[in-house]
Image (cartoon, rainbow, N blue to C red):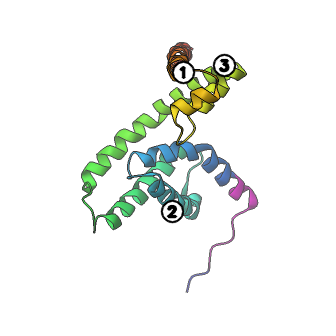
Amino acid sequence: MSTPPAPAPPEHYETFVRLFVHHEGRLRGFLRTLVRDWDDVDEVMQETSLVAWRKFSQFDPDTNFMAWAAAIARFEALKHLRKQSRDRLVFNDEILDLLAEESLEEVDSLERHRSALGKCLEKLDSRQKELLQLAYQPGVKFHEVAAQAGKSAQAFYKTIQRMRAALLQCAEKQMQAEAAT
């Protein structure tokens, strides 16, 4: 009969939580490329967090936590998809492995895009931020938001379109500047 492992020291918990929370958004983005919808992402993310916690004593702190957690997430996604395959058409494991590898390569790129866009959004004045928030609320009807903003639908659409183009240009410049350093 084996003895149960000794409880982990408190700093072990804190390190895990800090790393997991730091990478949670990227892990969710990675999982979204592998599973059908956000409900499935939530379900797989929950299992991923539990497995990652159980195996955290095996994690080498000198390595990449995101890559380690993504490997766990990929296995949990495959397990989830196998369960679903009983009643649906799903990809086989080889295709899912290929998708997972490509998605993991894109995670860093997406994170750089997200970071650059976040810096550009910070440069907007409060009125511009308000207009974007109105335009991108879930379930929003554009003509209603335009009226709320005091503009015609066409004028509001053009305003949002110009802001999106300016944000894209700003983000590209931001990424080029960061790549040059």
Separation of disc 3 and disc 2 at Cα? Answer: 38 Å
Decide which of tag 2 and tag 1 comes sooner along the chain: 2
- In this view, the residue farthest toward the right is 10
Decide which of tag 3 and tag 2 comes sooner along the chain: 2
Region in magenta: 4-14
In the rendered structure, does residue 123 fall within the stretch colored magenta? no
* Residue at 54% across, 14% down: 166
In the rendered structure, does residue 12 fall within the stretch colored magenta? yes
Q: Quadrant of residue 49?
A: bottom right
Q: Amino acid at mark 3?
A: Leu
Separation of disc 1 and disc 3 at Cα? Answer: 13 Å
Q: Which residue is mark 1?
A: 160
Most foreground residue, 83 or 107: 83
Decide which of tag 1 and tag 3 comes sooner along the chain: 3
Element marked by disc 2: helix
* Residue at 33% across, 64% down: 84
Most foreground residue, 175 or 171: 171
Crowd band around label 1 with a 10 angstrom C-alpha radius: few (<14), some (14–19), many (20+): some
Q: Amino acid at mark 2?
A: Glu
Residue 47's tag is 2
* Residue at 67% across, 72% down: 6
- On the rendered image, what quadrant is the C terminus found in? top right
Crowd band around label 3 with a 10 angstrom C-alpha radius: few (<14), some (14–19), many (20+): few
Q: Quadrant of residue 91?
A: bottom left
- On the rendered image, what quadrant is the N terminus found in? bottom right
Residue 124's tag is 3
Q: Give the x, y percent position of residue 107.
A: 46, 37
In this picture, residue 128 sits left or right of residue 177: right
Q: Give the x, y percent position of residue 55.
A: 54, 61
